[in-house]
Amino acid sequence: MSNRIEALGSAALSLVRAGVELWRVYVSTIAGVMRGFSRRKDRRGHGGRARQSRAQSELVRQLHAIGNKSIVFIVITLGALGMVMTYQACLQLGRVTGDYSQVGSQLLRLIISDFGPTLTAMMLATRVGAGIAAEIGSMKVTEQIDALRMSGVLPIDYLIVPRFIACLVMMLMLAVLGSAVMYAAGGLTAKYSFGVNPNTFFDLSFIRPRHLVLFVVKCLAYGAAIPIVAGFCGLRARGSSEGVGWATTAAVIGSSFAVIVLDFILSASALWLTGGDL
Amino acid sequence: MTEPAIRISEVHKAYGSRRVLDGISLDLARGTKLGLIGPAASGKSVLCKLVCGLEQPDRGEIEVFGERIVGKREVDLGPLRRRIGMLFQNYALFDFLTVEQNVAFPLEQGAAGTLSAETIAERVAARLRAVGLAGSEAKLTAELSGGMKKRVGIARATVADAELVIYDEPSAGLDPVTTQKIYDLLSADQARTGATVLAISSDVAALAGFVDEIAFLYDHRVVYRGPAATIADAPNALVRQFVRGDLEGPLDQAGPGMASLDRSIK
């Protein structure tokens, strides 16, 4: 019995320590972004320019890896989900009222305030989160992170900050694209499966600025959470390839979980702030 | 009296229940060369990482160039680390950079980036020539053999003329001729820069030709420290057996895992 209590206590302590470490990675990343902006002015000598140009090319590389390489994945997934959701909604409405006039406008509201950013983030958490954790984790177990530190480089500035900025930017872009594809796919399904007039379906009249604000806030929150959780898991990798595998799995689970928890918190906060009239 | 380059006082380090260092104390004067030897897993690499602040001790004090490093924040350790060059046991080369970019990395990141492009290129080319890797500048590290990786690691550790250089197994994976050439190069470098050197090697004979003194780590402590030239005749029986590679002796019974290894041989 005492062994079980000891194990429980030890697990709780590890969880608290991991939470504190995650918080430190988050704070250090924000500080790293600030340092990056202030360093832009300091370009003395070739070393300064080389650092700057390497930082910029790394950011471009990450924008491409996180954004461009995710486009097909996001478009196919969200397009298919838009079709399924519209089909199911029309099917149920057809059985009950037969009135499809609200399907398009309500789907759009749902996409903008919830499904667009959240589903895009879930997709990014699996694709990008795993990639970030594997890359940083393998650098950790081969002591490349220690070698960076020995050159006076902060690993968070060098490895996590570019991924953080790229993920923030690309999360927003991909969510806009994914939401548009989801809505368009829903419109095509409604027209060809249930004969809904596109003019009726593509109805923007229910959209309020608050929906757009919630869309942007969710994109930024998810875009920040995914690289930080994944980078944190990568930095905690130990041992050899097994440790990298563990870090990758933990990154996918952790960043997906972070997206779900943030979705709940942000949606609940938005409902509370608008008095339930979202 | 000048301040030592490294001062380690009563340092303890454990990973969970595994004790690694148990009250180690060691001083290293500026401009001198100390070799660290000891059985596998005796904490030699951990001690080097503690000196650079890459790991923090559980207890004890460490000063490098008079600067306390225990409990120091990562961001504050940067300037001190730029005064230290380190060759990692497993090379730790950046696999996303070419050989040339790997060697240039400490120069680009250090000294507030004040060196010109020409100076960096010249120093990198000279270092690569010195380690026999001229012509391999554009190669990625994945295209190199183990010995070549080791030499790139040496070039990266020494390119910035650091005041303290730590070599973790500089000759591992190298043939005897290259080993001798590498040690000659390290000696010439040290004579030129006057750097303090801390070196770990399992090749005790080659190491003894390079360093001034050798310390023997055993049972989580420094149990012997003496002149490198006479290490094979050290008064400590453990050291003598380790250096000579004798099968019979005190290490035979007391070393970690030695008893089971001994049973397997018999």
Image (cartoon, coloured by chain):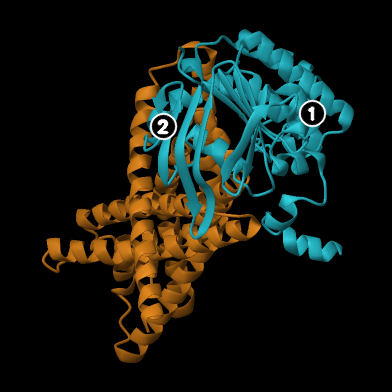
Chain colours: A orange, B cyan
Residue at (54% x, 63% y) in the render: A249
Q: Residues within 10 Å of mark 1 (few under 14, many from 20)?
A: some
Q: Residue at x 42, y 59 (%)?
A: A121
Task: Look at the picture and state if A107 lies above or below A159.
Answer: below
Q: Residue at point 82% right, 46% down?
A: B246
Q: Which mark is residue B206?
A: 1
Q: Position of residue A105 (x, y in %)?
A: 29, 67
Q: Is residue A262 above or below residue B57?
A: below
Considering the image in quadrants, where does the C terminus of chain A appear? bottom left
Q: Position of residue B202 (x, y in %)?
A: 75, 39
Q: Quadrant of residue B197?
A: top right
In x, y percent, where is residue B81? 49, 26
One can see residue A25 in this view: yes
Q: Nearer the viewer, residue B103 or B20?
A: B20
Which is more toward the observer, A195 or B90? B90
- In the displayed structure, would residue A219 be above or below residue B1? below
Q: CA distance from mark 2 to mark 1?
A: 31 Å
Is residue A108 visible from the viewing direction of this image?
no
Name the image quarter holding residue A13: bottom left
- How many numbered marks, from 0 up? 2
Marker disc for residue B69: 2
Rendered location of residue A169, percent (x, y): 41, 43
Residue type highlighted by circle 2: Ile
Q: What chain does badge 1 belong to?
A: B
Q: Chain of mark 2?
A: B
Q: Nearer the viewer, residue A192 or A21?
A: A21
Q: What residue do we see at 30% from left, 51% from top?
A: A216
Quarter-wise, where is residue B181 in the image? top right
Question: What amino acid type is highlighted by mark number 1?
Answer: Ala
Whether the residues at callouts 2 and 1 have beta carbons within 8 Å, the answer is no
